[in-house]
């Protein structure tokens, strides 16, 4: 299994792209502005998009991607790109984005019989099989219905998992589930510094102090990758995280980074 980090920032600025990961060459995990770094040929190879939640920094590239590849996929008679998400997330996308006002409804274009997008609901705890890749939908605790994902690396990895928490505040259910999984990589958000801990609490994100309390529930020593830091805040946030004496190997995630397991 291979993951390419397309975007991992909590907002945009020059050199900063919002959340998007590419699994192998055909599965997107979230669709923030980082998707725009893919070539047209790479965009045309995407067959599945897993969406953690409905916030704009995680979904805004879906419609633009659909517009970019519509002609190529129609000419090649490719099936629709499958959007996998919670029912509440799909409803939000259909009502607020693919509504003909913000963006065309690409689940009916270029025709209702052969659209470029199709929507596929999942539930927390469900295990998806995408071309032989096993992906479990994990719980998340956020201001809108949200999930994370655990990707099983298969027999070659000893069934080690790459885990993305999605946007989340404190979430005991996550750690209960991860206790029974073998982890290769844990990608977890820390959206605010400790000086904005109240804002983190209200918006159901993590700050370094809360991250430390969350990671204390995870046994062993794991490769932890911090995502969703705001532009200009990386050094301060990582300094606060580094001041904690964690048994885990913690680093800031960066766009362009690749992970294999």
Image: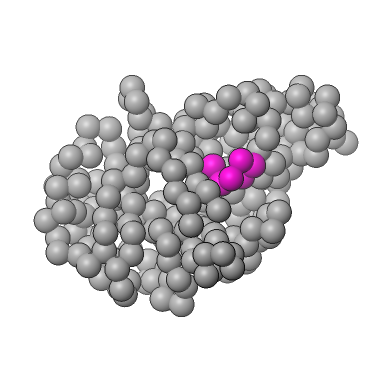
Q: Is residue 189 above or below residue 4?
A: below
Residue furthest out toward the front? 156
Q: Position of residue 106 (x, y in %)?
A: 72, 31
Residue 100 appears in the figure: no
The residue range painted magenta reads 22-27
Residue 114: which quarter of the image?
Answer: top right
Q: Is residue 19 above or below residue 201?
A: above
Q: Is residue 259 above or below residue 114?
A: below
Q: Residue at x 69, y 41 (%)?
A: 47
Q: Position of residue 28 (x, y in %)?
A: 57, 43
Q: Residue at x 39, y 54 (%)?
A: 187
Looking at the image, how many numbered discs can be counted on the residues?
0
The residue nearer to you, when weighing 228 against 133, is 133
Q: Position of residue 115 (x, y in %)?
A: 79, 34
Residue 12: which quarter of the image?
Answer: top left
| 80 horizontally vs 8: left or right | right
| 214 horizontally vs 141: left or right | left
Residue furthest out toward the left? 243
Residue 66: which quarter of the image?
Answer: top right
Q: Residue at x 62, y 62 (%)?
A: 134
Q: Position of residue 16 (x, y in %)?
A: 35, 30
């Amino acid at each position: 299994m291979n993951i390419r980090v397309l975007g991992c920032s909590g907002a945009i600025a020059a050199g900063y792209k919002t959340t998007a990961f590419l699994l192998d060459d055909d599965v997107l995990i979230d669709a923030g502005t980082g998707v725009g770094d893919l070539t047209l040929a790479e965009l045309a190879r995407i067959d599945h998009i897993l969406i953690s939640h409905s916030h704009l920094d995680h979904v805004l590239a879906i419609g633009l991607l659909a517009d970019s590849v519509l002609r190529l996929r129609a000419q090649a008679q490719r099936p629709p790109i499958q959007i996998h998400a919670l029912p509440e997330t799909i409803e939000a996308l259909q009502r607020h984005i693919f509504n003909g006002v913000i963006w065309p409804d690409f689940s009916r274009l270029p025709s209702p019989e052969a659209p470029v997008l199709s929507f596929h609901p999942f539930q927390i705890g469900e295990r998806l099989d995408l071309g032989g890749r096993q992906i479990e939908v994990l719980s998340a605790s956020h201001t809108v219905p949200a999930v994370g994902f655990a990707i099983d690396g298969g027999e070659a990895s000893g069934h080690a998992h790459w885990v993305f928490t999605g946007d989340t505040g404190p979430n005991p259910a996550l750690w209960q589930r991860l206790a029974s999984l073998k982890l290769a990589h844990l990608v977890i958000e820390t959206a605010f510094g400790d000086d904005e801990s109240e804002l983190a609490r209200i918006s159901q994100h993590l700050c370094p102090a809360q991250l430390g309390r969350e990671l204390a529930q995870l046994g062993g020593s794991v490769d932890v990758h911090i995502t969703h830091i705001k532009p200009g805040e990386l050094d301060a946030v990582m300094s606060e995280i580094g001041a904690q004496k964690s048994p885990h190997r913690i680093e800031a995630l960066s766009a362009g980074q690749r992970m294999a397991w």
